[in-house]
Image: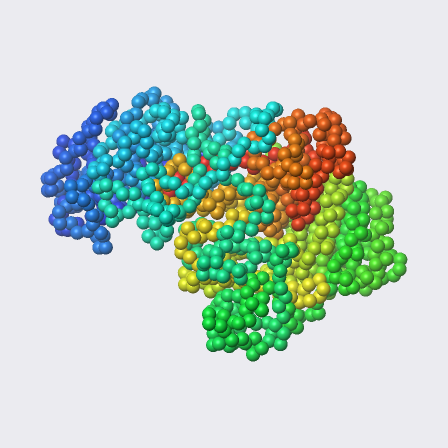
Amino acid sequence: FTSTGLRASRAMSCSGQPPGRPGAPPAGQPVQRMQPPTGAVPPSALPMGACRPMMPPGGMPLRGPPPSVAPGAPGMMPRPTGPDPSSTTQPARPAMPAPGAGMVPIGGPPMGARPPMGARPPVGARPPIGARPPTMPTGAVPPRGPPPSVAPGMRPSGPAMMPRPQTGMLLAQPAQSAPPQPQTTAPQPQLQAEHTPAVPVGQAPRGPSPSVGSLPAMRPSMAGQNGPPPIAAVPAPGPGRPPPPANGRVPPPRATPAQPHSHGPPLPGTGPSPAPVTPKVQMYQPPGASKTAAIPTAPASPSVGPPPSVPPQPYMSPPPQMPISPNSGSLASPPVSGRPTDLRPVAGGAGDVDQPLAESFCTLNITSGSGGPGGVPSEQLPRPTPEELNNPLRLTTRPSEASVVNSAAQCHPKFMRMTVNALPNSAGTKIKAALPIGAIIQPLARSDDVDVPVVNFGAAGVVRCRRCRTYMNPFVSFMDNGRKWRCNVCGLSNDCPNDYICELDGEGRRRDRAERPELHLGAVEIVAPAEYMVRPPQPPVFLFLVEVSYSAVSSGMLRCMAATLQHTLDRLPGGERTQVGLITFDSTLHFYNLNNGSPKMFVVPELDEVFLPLPEDLLVNLSEHRSTVVNIFERLPTMFAQTQSSEVALGPALKAAFQLVSHVGGKLHVFTCSRPTIGDGKLRNREGAAPKGSVKDLPSASLLQPDTDFYKTLAVDCSKQQLCVDVWSCNSAYADLATIGQLAKHTGGSVYYYPSFSDMNQGEKLSRDLQHNLTRQQGLEAVMRVRASRGLRISAFYGHFFIRGVDLLALPNVDEDKSFAIEIAHEENAVTANTACLQAALLYTTIDGERRIRVLTMELPVTAALTTMFEAADVDACASLMGRISAEAALSSKLLDGAEKLQNICMELLRAYRSLCPPQAKSTSQLLLPESLKLLPLYTLALMKSTLFCPSTEVRADERSNLMYLIGTMSCFQSTTLLHPRLFQVEPPVSQLGQLPTPLALTIQTMEATNAYLLDDGMNLILWLGRGVRSEFLQGAFGWPTLENVDPSTLRLLPEGSSREAEHVHKLLEAVRAERSWGWMPLSVQKQGHGDASFMRALVEDQTKQMMSYPEFVVHCHRYILSKVT
């Protein structure tokens, strides 16, 4: 992987200077345009006849400010000349030239001469219009320092940039510089919150700052790559550092020799010569580093479990020199003597006067390492709590009772979940915040604890806005004594139907508000009248398209599927309206007449022009022909037990199924074990097209894109006929799920993937998944539309659907596990209202044949304060939306671009938040995190290390495609579980029988080789056995005294009552599975060092061969933020 720093280092010339004009910033770094400070007098404002100052008498030629910095700007003092660098005494301040002495008229200065940096404006010069002159105490001298756009210690850009020594920053020198010398620096008050490291004259920078266009979190295999510039920490006054002078006079700094390899000042309390503060370089690969760290063979301490974790506390105590305002919790402006009291260094958050500063945030201290890179102490890293891992709803981020929004009427977060529960008032505010603005919608989510009442408007009809078609909701306002109501989306005044009129109370609310659910609840279900139907309600139709080739029979897929359907027929939803059909295929097509007492099979070898024999008898009513259907599923495995066919004609079989149910619609279940090889839709082996080790063998997004348009075209036709397709892939080799999965993506279906399927290992998983799929709550022939208030629009949709028109989602089938994501953008320059509404309406047919409209409504405050938006952010919803956005980016280009997109969103968000923090908190040795999003760096790194973006060639293309489909339909809870699994200690037991222990941190440092651990990622359960696990546990749980020469995949748990160890494991598995409502999770056993790659990949906090560890990624984000903040 090539980074920006590597390209910049190759572009440097032999002399060490970056290419380009002299004094230009290095390649890859943005040019910092300097702005004149407050009160500066631009040259254009000087009166006629005014003069520019030359060099002082007897002094060295002083280099003045650039054209963007006005001469005489306050805080710009001349550079002291002539002092002995080794002297510890303070040099005298050079005399200022008298007015008129050594002056030349404007327009005629000597070539190359520039006015001194500390020159005062000439007498009589007029300040610019609107400028406010600084208020200075009598006899005080303005404090010295650079303009706001110039980093402390740096002179304005010019042909040769000389560093200006200052307290709190040391110059970076090459390794071959002179040995370290004692440093003597004069104390100087902190004038700015951010410091940029200086670069000596004639020396190329250590490396370009990490740019948005690179992917620094990836670890390359080459060593010696230049990293970003060092971080200069600003120490607070402490022992040996006197406080700022009370008179406001700032003495000139002592000339201090530059120290080699100095990356920051000594940390308080660590002595005169501490280890440098050097965070890990972005693409560092230690020599001999392995993919995973070694597990200690003996416990480090007698205690069981991880070290005591100290979560990061919100920032509430500033440095000693910054007092806190009493009874407010906010940081007060420090009284600095001799400094103008009417001028503030920071007007507000993000540099805006109207932006309030953040009052509570998390701080992570970047510590120095002894002879190594810096990092963050493990106990300070933010980690999710057990409550946050167990279905977090993040109710604290939603609008409160005291806000302008009625929180009791909001839609429950199980159905609709906003990424930010406060919307920006303009597109500019959204750009400044850098937050993903959108929502995760799961309209039919399982809601055992949430009641969704059914509303029947009766003769009044469905009450909707006649312009934007918004449904009646709790946030509309009534007028004219209840005869009219104003739409909260478009603002139109509508007339109430005569049967819906009710008088208002003294607060302007309807008196029957508590009796009507649509007026006080955000989630209701409306009975749709006849005008919402274009045909009679669709009956539940289940058509099974099953492969019967040699692979399907030998793997046990055919037997497992047939046995499951045989025992699930009685639980199929729909009652007497349910219809069932069956088609099998290999190199030919097999149709079954189920209308008679004894089923008959018809074989059609013609694949070019598919036709249906006896089309009236292939789809039958289940209640009327149940015995016939049960008979065919009983005989199906034995009918093809002797088959030797290896050819598969999936395309013609799909065409036949489409012809069979196109008149009614329904659900098509496709079971495959081989890649299509003949007929329409045949696919080639793209994964094995290139030899191992070639360039084409590297992970590429091309394998995630469909190879042919046949399946997408067929899926669009199925969507138009209300036919949904579910794909069940049990392939032992490459199946090309990226292409076949288009059937489910565009019809609202699901993709199930069982790699190297065997009924011994995965038969129970397939059977339970099929039962859950057939019996869960679902809606038929549905459409969904999301409406937003005036000034907002829906800019993007994510999920499995087909879009009709602009914003109508066609869903032939929608179930309780499906979710959809949207992005919200601004349609106008600004939203003038105080609140904005978002309403999702799903029109569908229930299994019982009723036409319903599920209406989900939320009203959110509109704000211009960035701090309010960050406080209302939902980290789980943000991570889910970011995962979908990055997955789409990977599909459009390559995998690395998707991971880069994900990383950039996270780092830009943190950079925007840092600008909102108080200036005294912006130490270069601290990373500032919003309290609501403190887990976002961990979730971002986990997604980058997931199977989707993992650059390892060990991950198969079908696994990536399967995860792509899962991310597009997962709920927030399920996606968080997949990104950050739970790790429990099983042996030795640390909890009561049947109770879940406290989850451990996902790092190998919390594990021991003598223990056993259980990993829960929401999809699978992995029981990991260390090399030194007790033989008593192995004997009691599996019946084996040792793991030597034993394949862990063949291990099976003994019955629950056979031993105490087996009972403990069974109770633990039951407790974990009870919390996962979206499916059954199988158990697999893995042994340390033998086929445990999937378990090690789930330890997202550890370093891998290509990716950073969690502490390294946090330091990298901090480096990026410092490189962007000026």
Residue, x 53% and y 52% (percent of image)?
Answer: 395
Q: Is residue 50 left or right of residue 275?
A: left
Q: Position of residue 160 (x, y in %)?
A: 28, 34
Query: Where is 800 relative to 984, above or below?
Result: below
Q: Residue furthest bottom?
A: 498
- Residue 834 location in percent, x, y? 43, 62
x%, y% of residue 272?
Answer: 34, 24
Screen quadrant of the C terminus: top left
Residue 417 location, x and y as percent?
55, 54
Q: Quadrant of residue 998?
A: top right
* Quadrant of res 666: bottom right
Residue 639, placed above or below residue 20: below
Question: Is residue 851 at least partly visible in the picture?
Answer: yes
Residue at the outermost right position: 598
User: Residue at image x 45%, y 29%?
Assistant: 373
Q: Quick check: 1011 left or right of 214?
A: right
**Residue at image point 58% right, 36% down:** 1000
